[in-house]
Image (cartoon, helix red, strand yellow):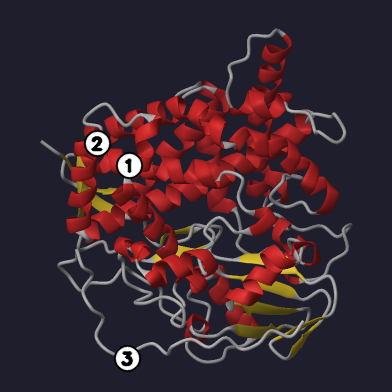
Amino acid sequence: MNMATRKSPEPVESAPPVCPFSQTNVQPPKPPSREGRVSLWRYLKLFKQDILSAQPARLYRAWMAEFRTPFFRSYMCNQPELVDLVLKGRPDDFPKSDRIREGLTPLLGNSVFVTNGATWRRQRRIIDPAFEGGRLRDTYPAMLEATQSAVARMVASADGGPQDIESQTSHAAADVIFRTLFSIPIEHEVASQVFEEFKAHQRTQPVVNLGALLPLPRWVPRFHKSKTRQTATIIRHLITRLTEMRMDEIAAERAPDDLATKIMTTADPETGETFNTEEMVDQVAIFFLAGHETSASALAWALYLMALYPEWQERVAHEAEAIYGSDGPEFSQIGKLRVARDVFRETLRLYPPVPMMVREATGEERFRDRNVRKGSQIVLSPWHLHRHERLWERPDEFDPSRFSTENGKSCLREAYLPFSSGQRVCTGAGFAMIEGTLLVSMLVRACRFELVPEKPAMPVAHLTVRGKDGIWLKVTPRA
């Protein structure tokens, strides 16, 4: 398919204007781009250190870029029409690349995150009903309890000294997952073990696995680190315990009405089958990885941006005080937290937790007058798309009010995909937006966040976008 060249106004090379509610010209931190051409091995070394700074600056303006290796070709597509074609127009012709699962298999098994075709469609038919609008209302009380616990922990540690806020947001996101999924707090024995093992697993998880780089047959070992395999085995064993306990509770008709019960009792409308234990363990593993790791990343960056732009922080706190006071909002009030929502939405634009997605061409294609071979890797980069100089006005600035402008509204439709898009859009996208808005609003209402000048944050991307040396803030309780 031949995609016509998109015409857009060129960016203006001048000093960036101040946001309507901003009192500073400081811009959010952005990793430096790679300079010039590098060899494949140099690129892999840079890629291992940080996915983002390994890329050239031209990707912030390019509609498409081709990368060649001795083993495969990849194409980064930033043109909205191409992104739409891959994710919405012909998604079955561009399934998720098998290379993505190479490094994740020890933990995720055959979860919905890595499957394709009939297996993936069956999994989504069973999972999706648990995250429908009405179910989110049912899940909200558990989410609110987790947020109230996060606020209490933050206030207790808010002594005005520097602290790595990522540890707090990681704890909060894990608590939300366990309370909404299994109706247990993070302090539960099994939940706390999973949380600790997952932190150890993150430290051992490589960015690049041999199978992701070379077209290896299935029977060739992938040489995962022993610690990676060990922590994944422990996590899956613990999740199996929770799953089997829940199956017993369902059989005895005393299971709580949470997400795990809903998913485990939902039958595939086409086959009448439900998930068995191993399948459910696969799905819980990805819920924890996606729902915990990505939410923790987004929340940490949101709090950092609140410290960087204190005028926006005060607007969020004022909104919270005006709408719900000290107890936390009711579900019906979440939609009224417009400032907190736009702050979180802008955070996801600047720091999308999953910076890149990879699909694979199942046939010969023609993109922008260029032949794309069968088997080529199609890279879609929310990081570059969200900061694209030919799409967004002032792309590197933090301005939550942009979403009320014509440019912001247009880009929301065609150049904003923190949760992917099309048939493979994240099933928990609505859940994540409520969670993020709630946590940002309640934490900022309870505490004031300030920068630590000697510890500036710099984003790096491995599985998700995190702080290179943590995200350090000073936290004090509000009077």
Q: Secondary structure at mark 1?
A: helix
Q: Which mark is residue 470?
A: none
Give the mark, 3 or 1, whose residue is nearer the N terminus.
3
Q: Picture coordinates of residue 355 (x, y %)?
A: 53, 64
Residue that numbered label 1 is attached to: 336
Q: Picture coordinates of residue 62 (x, y %)?
A: 54, 85
Rendered image quadrant of residue 253: top right
Q: CA distance from mark 3 to mark 1?
A: 37 Å
Q: Is residue 200 visible?
A: no
Give the mark, 1 or 2, whose residue is nearer the N terminus.
2
Q: Picture coordinates of residue 228 (x, y %)?
A: 64, 48
Q: Which mark is residue 13?
A: 3
Whether residues under marks 3 and 2 lie with C-beta atoms below 8 angstroms apart, the answer is no
Q: CA distance from mark 1 to mark 2?
A: 8 Å
Q: Residue at x 37, y 38 (%)?
A: 334
The residue furthest front is: 406
Vertical placement of residue 353 versus 239, above or below: below
- Quadrant the N terminus occupies: bottom right
Q: Secondary structure at mark 2?
A: helix
Badge 2: few (under 14), some or many (20 or more) residues near its Cα, within 10 Å? Answer: some
Whether residues under marks 1 and 2 lie with C-beta atoms below 8 angstroms apart, the answer is yes
Number of labels in the image equals 3
Q: Picture coordinates of residue 65 (x, y %)?
A: 62, 84
Residue that numbered label 2 is attached to: 323
Q: Residue at x 64, y 69 (%)?
A: 84
